[in-house]
Image (cartoon, rainbow, N blue to C red):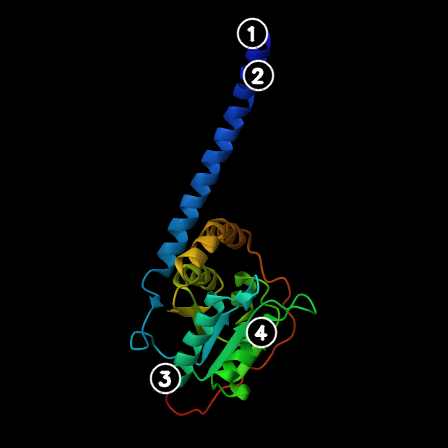
Amino acid sequence: MRLHVARIRSIGKRFSLPLLILGGAGMLAAGIAEHLITAAAAGHIHGSLEEIRPADVALVLGANPRVQGVPNPFYEARLDAATRLFNARVVRGILVSGDNSRSDYDEPSHMKADLIRRGIPAEFITCDFAGFSTLDSVRRARPVFGQQKVILVSQRFHLERALYLAGASGLTAEGFAAEDAPLQWHLRVRSRETLARVKAVFDVALGRGPRFLGPRERVNLGADSPLR
């Protein structure tokens, strides 16, 4: 029995050091990513219409419209925020960017239809069907849709990462924070966000581009009269 216990302890010691090293490296990577991303976003996220400077286009980052059969509050709040920007004449058009990687899943079309239901004219809503991730959405805005400056629309925690990616892509961007989801929804995504931030830093370091670039597309805008 003593020999068996000693062997178990020996195996435990053999594996504990690598696990500690991996855990420490993971914590270090998460800490560095958090610092870089929050620093890049500092002063660029706005919660009121009065704070944010006008731009031609609001780039709304996609989300699943429904989760486990119920409306996704993150999704609804982003569309509400984009509607506020358009109605206040802060932007002249809306670019909805989301995942359409399967024939039975189409975030951009859902977003466009729900914005139309909110009163936004269909002709001023443009769909980016290859926004498979935040990186894809942000890094397609300049080369595909010809935008040099955008207002990013999402929740504050997500905007921090999106603004970091925008800065690394040469895209001038400000963030307009949508209302946050209830706490139980918020907790679901925060753990994933930590990993997403580490990945974003590695994506930038490696110069990773969008999964699909494709040809140039036109963004339809409203009248050329001064905004606001």
Q: Which residue occupies the extreme top position in the image?
A: 2
The answer to which of marks 2 and 1 sits earlier in the sequence is 1
SS class, disc 3: loop
- Mark 2 vs mark 1: give the one in front: 1
Q: Mark 2 is on which residue type?
A: Ile
- Residues at discs 2 and 3 in contact (Cβ within 8 Å): no
Viewer-closest of 151 and 9: 9
Q: Would residue 228 appear left or right of 192 to someone viewing this image?
A: left
User: Label 3: which residue?
Assistant: 88
Q: How far, Cα to Cα, is label 4 from label 3?
A: 23 Å
Q: How far, Cα to Cα, is label 2 from label 3?
A: 67 Å
Q: Mark 1 is on which residue type?
A: Arg
Q: Mark 4 is on which residue type?
A: Pro
The answer to which of marks 1 and 4 sits earlier in the sequence is 1
Viewer-closest of 110 and 185: 185
- Which residue does the image show at 35% across and 66% down from the upper left? 45
Q: Position of residue 25 (x, y in %)?
A: 47, 37
User: Label 2: which residue?
Assistant: 8
- Which picture quadrant has residue 152? bottom left
User: Label 1: which residue?
Assistant: 2
- Residues at discs 4 and 2 in contact (Cβ within 8 Å): no
Q: In the rendered image of this protein, does residue 107 appear above or below residue 18?
A: below
The answer to which of marks 4 and 2 sits earlier in the sequence is 2
Viewer-closest of 161 and 112: 112
